Amino acid sequence: MAKKRHKKHEEEASEAWLLPYSDLMTLLLALFIALFAISQTDQNKLQALAQAFTAAFNTGGPSFFDQAGPSVSMQRQVMSDEDKGEDAYLQAEAAYAQETETLADLQAQLDAYIQENELEGELTTQLEEEGLMIRIKERALFPSGSADLVPESQRIGPIVAGLLAAVPERVLISGHTDTDPINTAQFPSNWELSSVRAMTFMKYLLEINENLNPARFSAIGYGEYRPIAPNDTPENKQKNRRVEILIARTLSFNPNGGYANQTDTDLVAK
């Protein structure tokens, strides 16, 4: 009899590990399912899973799943921020397109005036990323080596001033020369000549049209350092001797960063 009781006791001892092992497996399964659920972005599925596990394992205390995953309020905040960013981009895109259309209309008006008055050899226009560029050759505004306006400028100044008064954008007027050196008492170098020419033409525009706001305007001289043609022939040098009027965009487009306000520093640097 003693031998049989001993055998029964050994059988019971050998099966005792099954209970903690099954509990451990259950806990590991719950852990992996919880980690999987937390990694998912579907909040509805996570809440349904949390309710199922809470019903199965809850012993009266707070459930682990009560704090699992991002909160609904945080999700709403993230969505709100994304919506605001998208709305801001769309608004900037619409403003950029509208400004492009306005500048294109101005270009068409000036091009029509140039053609009607046979000024193709003196004025050109170009719609660029920075804005609407108006280029005026030296001979249409100034005598060679001088910053005094010629009578011919009266055919150009009023129409340009009128176009500038029709828009609110900033205006940058720049003077340019060729590489031929100048050294006079008034203009020791091409820097002075180009700067005074830009300033003279800017003041002329402001004087002939009282609707122009001087705060929108700035003038700068670049000398011979921003040519649009090689200074190797008389014809090319004539192209480089010019005054430019840039009607600057309010917004500039960066393919890597969307739309941004364009500053005076940006314009001078370009």
Image: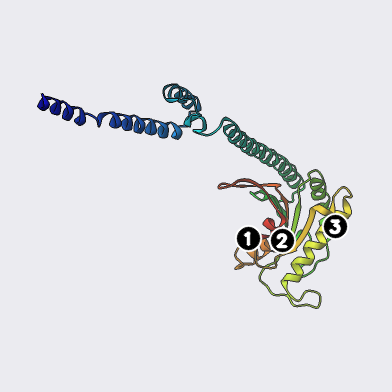
Towards the viewer: 124 or 8: 8
Q: CA distance from mark 3 to mark 1?
A: 25 Å
Q: Residues within 10 Å of mark 1 (few under 14, many from 20)?
A: some
Q: Residue at x 74, y 45 (%)?
A: 110
Q: Residue at x 76, y 69 (%)?
A: 193
Q: Amino acid at mark 1?
A: Ile
Q: CA distance from mark 2 to mark 1?
A: 10 Å
Q: How many marks?
A: 3
Q: How is the image coloured?
A: rainbow
Q: Residues within 10 Å of mark 2 (few under 14, many from 20)?
A: many
Q: Amino acid at mark 3?
A: Tyr
Q: Amino acid at mark 2?
A: Arg
Circle 2: element type = strand
- The earlier-in-sequence mark between 3 and 2 is 3
Residue topped by disc 1: 228
Towards the viewer: 174 or 86: 86
